[in-house]
Image (spheres, grey):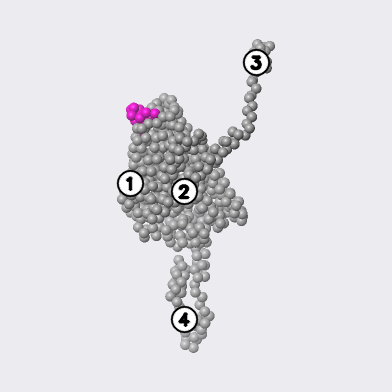
């Protein structure tokens, strides 16, 4: 024994126990090299799997395989890869779904692309119904699923759920209410199906806002979660009111952060010459997007809600401040990142079936939870649709029919956000909730997503060809020709086909044109009208001097004489007529 390691008695009577010398392990480099090689093989396998998923998605699109959505195909590929990894790989670290990687790496491109490519006309025309479904519908679904889960557990039908307090069940109700209809939208957005535009805008609008609201609701409940909650019902009622108020404040502040950073970015682009440096232009736009998400999360707000409205603001104002090259590049890059992120998310969800390392799970809980979700979805879609129809200005033309409501009820798929939130469930019953959520996500994505095309056909939700052409003419901010991108041309087309706006919408348009667009960017409608008028004058045929004025004083005429015009080609008559019509407008 080394003498320096023997305890010694000090003069004050205390015993000093010497700290043993640390053992230094000298690595000869073999272990690190082996680990690096294994990680390289793992990343290569993931890359090959991702390539296969992209090619499979291409095959589905080309051959119109509506019974197997792209997201469902990626999920099933992930299940196969996860099974191989489970039985043959020695380290599963890179194959396990990481919630933080999902929220900070994979999710931001998806949300920003949804806001940046948003069809603003349809979205804001149906904003009332969308907010009803996204906000109040999510609350209704959360409490129905949560309390049904709690009471079924209290009655002894379900096991693995806290029966002392409903807070844990409400957390599950909040996360499982996150609708993620990627599979449904990928089919509804197919041009061959010609899905009803009102239906598509409602499903899309609900999905992008519902996810953000579900996350805010989950975080709010999580802040009040206590495992051994023995408070009285009166105290719980007070806490419930406080939670709802916190939910509303968090949502409002998240939107405010997104709008503020979007306007700040637009102001910088408007009042600098950064468009002359395309690499800096794109880098700054990319960093502002991630910065918006990170800012909201650092303030304990909703990054999804902030980033979505940030994308809407940047598309409305900043797209006019970007160079033509940056406009094309931004739309393509964000779209590509969104596709890769969505594919990776469903791939990892599929692999989670075998790589999750779950210790507890139940057969009955997933089936009953799926039934709870169906009931909660119907309880918010049907009454809220009735309320939305009563409040719509043109209820006859824009009515949400019963068949449309059934499609909306069927389109309530659960996806990656619900699964990621389940990974953050607290308490000893976490694995039970994760396995239940994973089952519901796989079932709704593969089964419900696969039946979407058949449901649309049975319900007659495919738009007529004339309606599709009319919708395409009415779009003011979508489907640009990216090679010859021209915001001015899009604004002119929209201005000619639109009518005079009144009420709140007209007041906002006037305020936007007079105060916001000159400061942050955008095409002002008065300038569009003036340039349209000038262009129409320039396109008029020029009359030759030989056919101009001539004196006719001897005959007591009007002082000039129009001589005979030469015969024109029919196409020239058409151009002159179109130009005259343009000038009249």
Q: Which residues are magenta?
A: 148-161
Among the two numbered marks 1 and 4 on one chain, the one whose residue lies closer to the N terminus: 1
Residue at mark 1 to residue at mark 2: CA–CA distance: 31 Å
Choose between 190 and 347: the one closer to the eye: 347
Tags 3 and 1 in contact by the CB under 8 Å rule?
A: no
Q: Which mark is residue 566?
A: 4
Residue at mark 3 to residue at mark 1: CA–CA distance: 80 Å
Quarter of the view holding residue 494:
bottom left
In the image, residue 102 sits, relative to residue 121, either above or below, namely: above
Q: Nearer the viewer, mark 1 or mark 4?
A: 1
Choose between 16 and 314: the one closer to the eye: 16
Q: Nearer the viewer, mark 3 or mark 2?
A: 3
Residue at mark 1 to residue at mark 4: CA–CA distance: 64 Å
- State yes or no: residue 408 in magenta: no
Among the two numbered marks 1 and 2 on one chain, the one whose residue lies closer to the N terminus: 2
**Residue 150 position within the rendered picture, expressed as x and y whole percent measured from the top left:** 37, 31
Q: Which mark is residue 54?
A: 2
Circle 3 crowding by C-alpha within 10 Å: few under 14, some 14–19, many from 20: few
Helix, strand or loop at label 4? It is loop
Residue at 42% over, 60% down: 473
Choose between 13 and 316: the one closer to the eye: 13
Tags 2 and 4 in contact by the CB under 8 Å rule?
A: no
Residue at 49% over, 61% down: 489
Q: Which mark is residue 406?
A: 1
Residue at mark 3 to residue at mark 4: CA–CA distance: 120 Å
Helix, strand or loop at label 1? It is helix
Please name the residue that numbered disc 3 is placed on.
1
Among the two numbered marks 3 and 1 on one chain, the one whose residue lies closer to the N terminus: 3
**Residue 44 position within the rendered picture, expressed as x and y whole percent measured from the top left:** 52, 43
Quarter containing the C terminus: bottom left
Tags 1 and 2 in contact by the CB under 8 Å rule?
A: no
Circle 2 crowding by C-alpha within 10 Å: few under 14, some 14–19, many from 20: some
């Amino acid at each position: 024994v080394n003498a320096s390691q023997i305890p010694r008695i000090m003069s004050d009577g205390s015993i000093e126990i010497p700290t043993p010398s640390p053992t230094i392990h000298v690595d000869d480099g073999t272990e690190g090299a082996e680990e690096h090689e294994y990680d390289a093989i793992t990343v290569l396998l993931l890359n090959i799997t991702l390539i296969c998923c992209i090619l499979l998605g291409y095959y589905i699109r080309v051959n119109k395989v509506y019974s197997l959505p792209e997201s469902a195909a990626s999920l099933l590929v992930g299940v196969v890869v996860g099974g191989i990894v489970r039985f043959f790989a020695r380290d599963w670290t890179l194959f396990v779904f990481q919630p933080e990687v999902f929220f900070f790496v994979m999710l931001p491109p998806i949300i920003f692309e949804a806001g940046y490519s948003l069809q603003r006309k349809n979205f804001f025309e149906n904003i009332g119904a969308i907010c009803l479904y996204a906000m109040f519908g999510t609350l209704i679904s959360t409490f129905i699923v949560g309390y049904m889960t709690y009471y079924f557990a209290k009655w002894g039908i379900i096991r693995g759920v806290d029966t002392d307090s409903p807070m844990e069940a409400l957390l599950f109700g909040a996360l499982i209410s996150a609708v993620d209809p990627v599979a449904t939208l990928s089919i509804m957005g197919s041009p061959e199906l010609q899905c009803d535009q009102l239906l598509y805008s409602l499903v899309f609008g609900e999905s992008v806002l519902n996810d953000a609201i579900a996350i805010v609701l989950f975080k709010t409940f999580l802040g009040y979660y206590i495992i051994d909650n023995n408070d009285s019902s009166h105290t719980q009622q007070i806490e419930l009111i406080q939670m709802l108020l916190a939910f509303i404040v968090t949502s409002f502040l998240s939107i405010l952060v997104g709008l503020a950073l979007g306007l700040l970015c637009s102001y910088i682009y408007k009042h600098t010459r950064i468009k002359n440096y395309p690499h800096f232009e794109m880098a700054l736009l990319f960093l502002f997007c991630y910065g918006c998400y990170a800012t909201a999360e650092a303030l304990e707000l909703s990054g999804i809600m902030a980033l979505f409205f940030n994308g809407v603001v940047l598309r409305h104002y900043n797209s006019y401040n970007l160079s033509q090259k940056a406009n094309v590049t931004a739309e393509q890059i964000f779209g590509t990142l969104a596709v890769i992120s969505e594919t990776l998310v469903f791939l990892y969800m599929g692999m989670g079936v075998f790589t999750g390392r779950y210790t507890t799970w139940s057969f009955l809980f997933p089936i009953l939870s799926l039934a709870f979700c169906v009931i909660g979805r119907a309880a918010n879609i049907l009454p809220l649709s009735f309320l939305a129809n009563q409040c719509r200005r043109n209820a006859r033309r824009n009515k949400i029919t019963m068949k449309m409501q059934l499609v909306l009820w069927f389109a309530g798929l659960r996806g990656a956000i619900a699964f990621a939130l389940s990974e953050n469930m607290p308490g000893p019953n976490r694995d039970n909730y994760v396995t239940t959520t994973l089952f519901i996500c796989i079932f709704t994505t593969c089964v419900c997503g696969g039946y979407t095309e058949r449901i649309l056909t049975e319900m007659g939700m495919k738009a007529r060809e004339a309606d599709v052409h009319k919708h395409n003419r009415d779009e003011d901010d979508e489907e640009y020709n990216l090679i010859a991108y021209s915001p001015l041309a899009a604004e002119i087309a929209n201005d000619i086909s639109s009518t005079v706006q009144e009420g709140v919408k007209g007041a906002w348009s006037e305020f936007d044109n007079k105060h916001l667009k000159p400061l942050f960017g955008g095409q002002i409608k008065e300038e569009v009208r003036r340039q349209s008028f000038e262009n129409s004058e320039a396109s008029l045929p020029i009359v030759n001097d030989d056919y101009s004025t001539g004196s006719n004083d001897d005959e007591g005429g009007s002082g000039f004489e129009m001589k005979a015009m030469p015969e024109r080609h029919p196409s020239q008559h058409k151009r002159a007529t179109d130009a005259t019509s343009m000038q009249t407008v």
